[in-house]
Amino acid sequence: MLTIQELIAEFHKIQREDDIKALVQRFGLQSAGKHSNGQVLCFFKGIIEGAAITITHRWYDRCKTFSVQPDGNKVMLEIDGMKPVEIGFFNDF
């Protein structure tokens, strides 16, 4: 059985969207749909060691005037509804 500590360790390795998909599959998390806010790409939920787990993947625009940048991604891990325990960032390429 996988543990919360293993989830956190895997969460720290996220560097692209495929890493999120692999983590979700490995830990048996389920898609919880999309939020009405267009910046939230998806939610995943599940139970690990009796704790409710939520992973939220959102994007944000990193462009500034005269500076085109790839979109940024923010991934948040919440355990039992607490404030995000862990937050990770990566950029689209």
Image: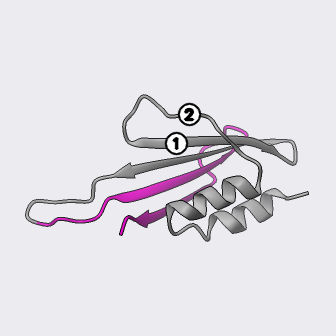
Q: Quadrant of the C terminus?
A: bottom left
From what the image shows, is residue 92 above or below residue 77? below
Residue under the image location 37 percent in, 64 percent down: 92
Helix or strand or loop: what does disc 1 sit on?
strand
In the image, 22: left or right of 14?
A: right
N-terminal label among 1 and 2: 2
**Disc ID at residue 33:** 2
Residue 64 figure quarter: bottom left
Give amino acid for label 1.
Cys
Residue 79 placed where, x, y %? Answer: 71, 45
Q: Residue furthest left?
A: 66
Helix or strand or loop: what does disc 2 sit on?
loop
> Which residues fall within the magenta stretch?
67-93
Residue 87 placed where, x, y %? Answer: 54, 58
Give amino acid for label 2.
Gly
Residue 23 placed where, x, y %? Answer: 68, 59
In the image, 89: left or right of 69?
A: right
Residue 72 placed where, x, y %? Answer: 36, 59
- Tell me whether the residue at label 1 lies in contact with that at label 2, contact meaning CB atoms closer than 8 angstroms: yes
In the image, 69: left or right of 90?
A: left
In the image, 22: left or right of 5?
A: left
**Disc ID at residue 42:** 1
Q: Quadrant of the N terminus?
A: bottom right
Label 2 Cα neighbours within 10 Å, binned few <14 / some 14-19 / many ≥20? few
Label 1 Cα neighbours within 10 Å, binned few <14 / some 14-19 / many ≥20? some
Observer-nearest residue: 26 or 52? 26
Q: Is residue 77 magenta?
A: yes
